[in-house]
Amino acid sequence: MSPARQQIIAIGGGGFSEGEPALDRYVLAQARRRSPTVSFVGTASGDSDRYVAKFYAAFTKLDCRPSHLPLFGRTPDLRAHLREQDIVYVGGGNTRSMLAVWREWGLPELLREALESGTLLCGISAGAICWFDQGVTDSGAEALEPLECLGFLPGSCCPHYHGEAERIPQTHRLLAEGRLAAVVAIDDGVAAHFVDGIAKCVAVSRDGADAYLVSVCDGQVDERPLEAERVRL
C-alpha cells in the first residue's frame, strides 16, 4: 500500500470566522472522502465558546460531519478523536500559548501521526503558522517576532500579510536580521495548499490577494508569488 498524501492548508485569514465559506468549501473538497469528518481546534482562543459556535454555525451548513476538540474543558482521548478525523481545522489566536498547551498534552506527536495517516491539517492565522518551522507571531504585546513551531513544513509563515500594516515591514526586518528562514506570506482570503511538503495550489477568494515567498537574495529582501497553481474561488 502506498503512503497517504500528507496535506496541509494554511489560510492567511478569513474563512468561517469572517463569513467566507468559499475557503472552507475548498478545504472540505481536498479531504480523502466525501462528507468528511472535521474537528475544530480552538486552543489559541482558549476554546472560546463564541468561536466554537461560529464554527458549528458555518460547518453544519456544509457537506461534512463537524466536531470540536476541547483542551480547556473535558478533553476526550486525543488519539482516538484524531483517528476519526478526515480534517483537523485549527483556529486563530495566541500561537505561543496554543503550542505550549499542545505540547503539555502531547498533541504535536498525535497530529504528526494523523498527517502521516492521511488526515488533512489546516487552519487560519495561528492555525496556519503552527505547521511550519517558524511563524511570524503577534502573540506578545510588542513587535512581531519569530516563533518556533511544529516543523511539519519547512521555512516560516506569516499570515495577514497585506491585511495588517506592520506585517510587511516587520517580516522584512526579521529576514534582513537573519532571524527567519524564507517566509511563505499569505494574505487574508487566501489558502496555501501543500502536498507532501510542496506548495501545490494557492486558492484565492478575494480580489488582489495572493501568497508569496519572501526571502533574502544577495543581501536584499526578495518577494515573489509562491510557485503553485492559482485557483480563484
Image (cartoon, rainbow, N blue to C red):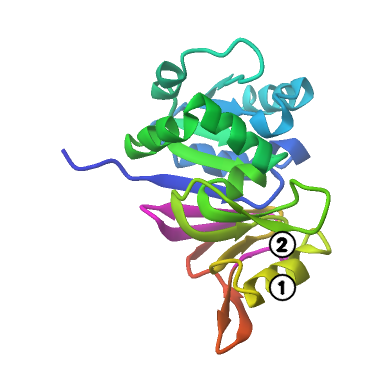
Q: Which mark is residue 173?
A: 1
Which of the marked residues, 2 or 1, is nearer the chain's N terminus? 2
Q: Residue at x 69, y 59 (%)?
A: 187
Magenta segment main secondary structure: strand
Instruction: Give, as a single range, the part of the protein colored magenta.
Output: 191-212
Amino acid of disc 2: Tyr
Q: Residue at x 65, y 74 (%)?
A: 177
Judge left or right: residue 91 versus residue 102: right
Q: Nearer the viewer, mark 2 or mark 1?
A: 1
Locate residue 168: give its quadrant: bottom right
Marks 2 and 1, Cα distance to the nearest angstrom? 14 Å
Residue on which disc 2 sits: 161
| Percent coordinates x, y for residue 73 in the rendering | 65, 13
The crowd level at tag 1 (other Cα within 10 Å; few <14, some 14-19, many 20+) is some
Indicate whether 125 appears above or below 36. Answer: below
- Residues tagged 2 and 1 counted as in contact (Cβ below 8 A): no
| Percent coordinates x, y for residue 204 in the rendering | 63, 57
Locate residue 69: give its quadrant: top right
Q: Residue at x 44, y 25 (%)?
A: 85
The quadrant in which the N terminus is found is top left
Judge left or right: residue 176 versus residue 10: right
| Percent coordinates x, y for residue 8 in the rendering | 47, 46
Q: Which mark is residue 201?
A: none
* SS at mark 2 in the image: loop
The crowd level at tag 2 (other Cα within 10 Å; few <14, some 14-19, many 20+) is many
Residue 91 visible to the viewer: no
* SS at mark 1 in the image: helix
Amino acid of disc 1: Arg
Indicate whether 42 appears above or below 26. Answer: above
Q: Residue at x 73, y 62 (%)?
A: 207
